[in-house]
Structures are given as structure tokens and as C-alpha cells.
Amino acid sequence: MASDTIYALSSGRPPAGIAVIRISGPDAFALTARFLKGGRLPTPRAASLRTLHNPADGDVLDQAVVLLFPGPGSVTGEDLAEWHCHGGQAVIRAVLGALEEQGRGGGLAVREAVAGEFTRRGFENGRMDLNEAEGLADLLAAETESQRRAAMMMADGHFSRRLEGWRSRLLACSAQVESLLDFSDEDDVPDSGMERALADALAALREDMAAQLAAPSAERLRDGIHLVLAGPPNAGKSTLLNALAGREAAIVSDIAGTTRDRIEVPVNLGGVAFVLTDTAGLADRSEDRIELIGIDRARQAIEAADILLWLGEANVCPRADAIRVAAQKDRTGWRMPAGVDIAVSALTGENIYALVQMILDRAKSFLPTEGSYALHERQRKAVAAMVEALTAAQVNSDLLIVAEYLRLAREEMDRLIGRSGVEDMLDSLFSRFCIGK
């Protein structure tokens, strides 16, 4: 447990209705007592309206609701106090200034917290594992509804509980191997049923982990699903992009070749993050070297797209999984082209909502299912390493080698949970949090 006591404003930037000042550490309660008349502390875990006095001169600082959470049953795993003060800037400055004075000359080891320090103490004191801490970081950074839901599931420990189940099964397999090795040390023949049970357990555990790897990744949630608009010149790509983005993000002109390079626009459609990419028109031929470079980049974007909106003739669509769109339904003399999936008018908005729903339906395969979570690259690499170790253990008949592969899998499990080998990434993770979290 840390030897010093930390404090910080844990609520939003003032002014606000309420400002929550959080204090955590061995002297959290003693420090709180100094600000209360007569040093009388409220009952733990019960909100109490108290007047805060500056210990230096006795001046009244504010009336606040004071709560005490004794460790280890607090979010940081140590004694923690919360002062719910009025959220005016002057009040907050006065209270934080008085706390700073106590750190300078009050005889207590008190200082302002650094970014993410409250959460880091919770992690170091066993109140959460590394995956729950990462989920909390994602929750604080969430900008879309899908990001919020997945981050909440991770922060609430759903993946951590699955890991504990994997860990128990992995330890059971290791124990089975040790039992089989004991038979061989005593020159006995192991029971064939024990060997079959071990093989079945390894296979089931490996399949469970592999199924998790097949699920969508967190990077898609965070960075956005890549939605590319492509087709010939003057097909209405830029106008449609602007309609989807809800702003004039791309230049619109009747002049062919106006879009000469990829234009990327992050948007939120139906609570899902997307990156819209407008591409150069795919002309059959061009004498313009710059336009040719744009066409080449457009083809690269088409290949890399998660979802492709094709605005050209359906029979020359470059991908079978594209959504084929007729984008200029408002034009005089327009007729429904053959083979398209949907016709829209970006100018009038006709069928734009239906197109967005079609896009969201396609996006489901790239997102975690309702009530599920998504793994980051670090987590996916660790699960992949465990799957690799279990695969090697399955195909090996030498029990000593099987035991070694299971040991490697347990090491990856410990790194994944945060029990070992993660010191180099902790500073980076917790620096993503705000000061009071």
C-alpha cells in the first residue's frame, strides 16, 4: 500500500453543481478530521452534511457532503474520503489550496494525485485487474454508444471472469499432467481414461479461447469501421459523403475529377464510429498523372474497405459484398438502374435513413454483439499465444513437453491479468486517465 495520501478534484471541470474531491491513502481520515469541527468524523459509508474549515485559520471553506470508505473495501483498496462540495471555481480553489497547505506544512504525507493514480492504486491493491482498468480507460474515452457498451462490459469484469474460468481449467490441466508424470516416474502405465480426459480438456479450452479471438476487435470500435465510397467520376460520391457526415466535408462540383485524393471523415452513425472515405472517380483512362495516383489510391481503399458503397454500374462493381447505390435519384429523367441495392438522393435526403440502416446492418459483423466486449491488441496477442501453446500441447505426446507448454500458457495468462510482465505498460495505461480518476 502507498505510504502517502493523495487528493484531487474527481468530478468535471468547474463551474458545476457539485464538485467531488477525492482523498485516498493512510491519512485520508486524519486529514478529513482536520477540516471538520472538533475532528468528529461521520459514520463510514453514510453521507453526512458537514462544514469544512481551513485547518490553518479556522475559516469556513464550504458546506459539503462527506463520505468515508474504509479500506480495503474502497475503489482504491485503501482508506478513501469524498467531499461533495459546491462546484464554483472559488470554492474548489479554496478547498484544494487548503489541502495543498496541509501537504506542505501539516505534518502529513499529503500531495495532489497524478493522472490515473486513484485507479492505479485500485489495481495495485487488487480491487481490479488490468483488463478492468483498461475497460475503465476505454469508458472514459468512449464517444459512441457502441464504444460505451463494450467498455462498460470490460470495466465490469465480464472478460476478467472469463479469464478466471480459463485459468482454473488451465491449472486443472497442469495438475492432470503432473499426475500422469507421477505414474511414469513410478514405472506405472497411466490410465488411458486420464489421457483422454486431458486431451478433451485441452481441446475444449483451446476452442473456447479461439472463439474469443474470432470476435471483433476493440480497435474497430475505437478507430471506426472503414466505409468507402467509390465509383466513376460525377457519380455523386462527394455529395453522398456530405449527406452521411451531416456537413460539407468534401468539395462538390460537376467537373469530373474534382476529388483527386482520398478524403477521410470520422462520423457517428447510429451510435457506431465510422471513417467515411471519399475516393477519386475511377476513370477508364486519364492523361493527368495526379488523377492516376488518385485512382490508384481509390483502388487500394476499395480493397481495404470494411464496407464499400459502390456508386457505379452494378455489373462492374469491384466487390461482391458491396452495397450498390444509385445516388442521384433527384436528377431529371432519372431511371432506376439495374442491379442496385438502394436508390437515394443526397440532395433531398430521400432514402438516406434507409441507407444508414443498411450500413448499420453490415456493420454488425465488425462489432461485439449486444452485451459483449471487445479485446485490444495486447489482450488478443496474449490469448493468441495461449492458443498456440495449447495447440502445441495437444499434438505432443511427451508429457514433459506438454507440461512446459502449459507453463508458457500460464505465464501468458498472468501477463494478461496483470500479475507479471506488464510493468512497462502501466505508466502508459494510467496516464490516459484524468487527474482525479
Image (cartoon, rainbow, N blue to C red):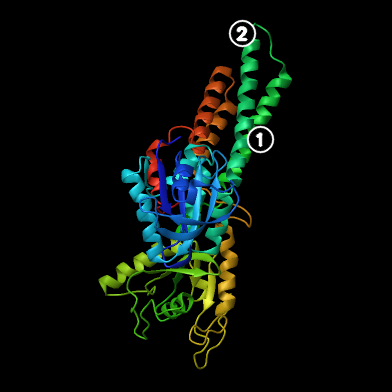
Q: Dot 1: few (<14), some (14–19), or many (≥20) neighbours within 10 Å?
A: few
Q: Quadrant of residue 370?
A: bottom right
Answer yes or no: is residue 410 visible: yes
Q: Mark 1 or mark 2, which is nearer the start of the sequence?
A: 2
According to the image, label 2 marks what residue? 185
- Residue under the image location 31 percent in, 70 percent down: 292
The x, y position of residue 42, in whole percent, is 56, 49
Asked if the residue under mark 1 is in contact with the one under mark 2, i.e. CB atoms within 8 Å, the reply is no
Q: Helix or strand or loop: what does disc 2 sit on?
A: helix
Answer yes or no: is residue 377 visible: no
According to the image, label 1 marks what residue? 204
Front-most of 391 and 65? 65
Residue type highlighted by circle 2: Asp
- Residue under the image location 31 percent in, 45 percent down: 104
Residue type highlighted by circle 1: Ala
Front-most of 396 and 14? 14
**Left or right: 206 with respect to 426?**
right
Q: Helix or strand or loop: what does disc 1 sit on?
A: helix
Q: Dot 2: few (<14), some (14–19), or many (≥20) neighbours within 10 Å?
A: few
Q: Quadrant of residue 276?
A: bottom left
- Residue under the image location 44 percent in, 74 percent down: 231
Q: Say if 33 sits above or below 200 in the image.
A: below
Front-most of 38 and 324? 38
Front-most of 158 and 270? 158
